[in-house]
Image: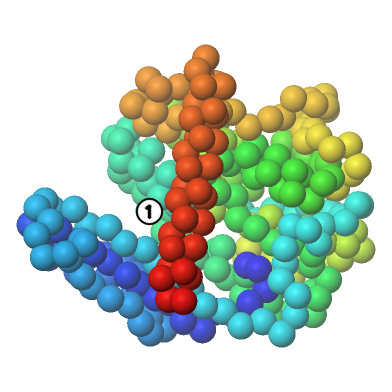
Amino acid sequence: MKGAKPISIMVDIHLGDDADIGKLFDFMAGITTICQLANVPLTTGSTLRIGGDMVIGNRITGGIGGIGITNNELYARRNIKLGDKILMTEGAGGGTISTTAIYSGHHEIVKETMNIKFLEACEVLLNSDYKNKIHTMCDITNGGLRGDLYEINYEADCGVTVNEKYIKDLVNPVVLKLLETLEIDYLGVSLDSLLIYCYPEDSEGIIELLNKYKIKCNEIGYVDNSKTVSIIFEGKVSKDFLPKFRESAYTKIKKEIGEETPKTKEKMEEKINNAADKALEKRNKIINFIKNFNN
């Protein structure tokens, strides 16, 4: 997605003393499924107890990492240019949509998410003549398109205008119907779609290339210098297309918590900043101690 060719996947997983070994097998089966589909080998990692010899409980924690090689500049957000066209590929969601389907009793919709269109789109583009004409590629993550466009604009110091008509057309119709039935804003959840920022003259060619490989793609908007995210709803431009405090609530528990900004936001921010400052202070203290101790 960022322009590098993936060559390795790493896994580090830790288990509590009473953890079900079957969960470990399921976890590794899931990882190696992706490895096989993406044709990227699992080359290294570790399986350990959590923190030591006596960690009571059935917890499983860990992480996954990937390594890639690139000979060109990465598709970083800072590369976005004024006038760039914004393309988006089709999406049916992943874990978020699966969770929504399971928790709402619509288990049959999980199968709609079982595809590798995202990986296929990346592979097609990275092996094409367009790879040097794309400025940025990124996925639509947990904040949804609302959160991603806002974050990208902030980092790239630009603005965008997008058309909701062309965005909605790219959402799997079965998944979209589920979200609408459950009153979940599809613009605030992960869709497993790819966003592509490119030169205006390359937009049509990229769309045609992806369509050739049966990957639906639309031009959804363009980059401007407004420093805001605007969206066109049924011909009307909205200047208030901002992310909510939380992603769209896709389970009953999340709906109870809500998506709006809490009244205690300022106090929360103060405590977070204080915790960050103390962590940095502790880090510097440990670094100085180790340096002085070894001198």
- In depth, the one of 51 and 224 nearer the eye is 51
- In depth, the one of 234 and 277 nearer the eye is 277
Quadrant (top left, top right, bottom left, bottom right) of the N terminus: bottom right
- In depth, the one of 290 and 40 nearer the eye is 290
When asked about the image quadrant of residue 158, the answer is: top right
Q: Is residue 232 visible?
A: yes
Colouring used for the render: rainbow
**Which residue is rendered at x = 74% and y = 25% of the image?**
240
When asked about the image quadrant of residue 213, the answer is: bottom right
**Which residue is rendered at x = 71% and y = 85% of the image?**
71
| Type of amino acid under label 1 | Lys
Q: Position of residue 135 (x, y in %)?
A: 79, 64
Residue underneath mark 1: 111
Q: Is residue 18 left or right of residue 34?
A: left
Q: Residue furthest top?
A: 263
When asked about the image quadrant of residue 54, the answer is: bottom left
**Vertical placement of residue 243 versus 196, above or below:** above
**Which residue is rendered at x = 63% and y = 39% of the image?**
147
Q: Is residue 169 visible?
A: no
Q: Residues within 10 Å of mark 1 (few under 14, many from 20)?
A: few
**Which residue is rendered at x = 11% and y = 65% of the image?**
53
Q: Position of residue 122 (x, y in %)?
A: 63, 70
**Vertical placement of residue 205 versus 256, above or below:** below
Q: Is residue 114 left or right of residue 152?
A: left
Q: Position of residue 6 (x, y in %)?
A: 54, 79
Secondary structure under tag 1 reads helix
Q: Is residue 203 left or right of residue 19?
A: right
Q: Is residue 151 left or right of residue 96?
A: right
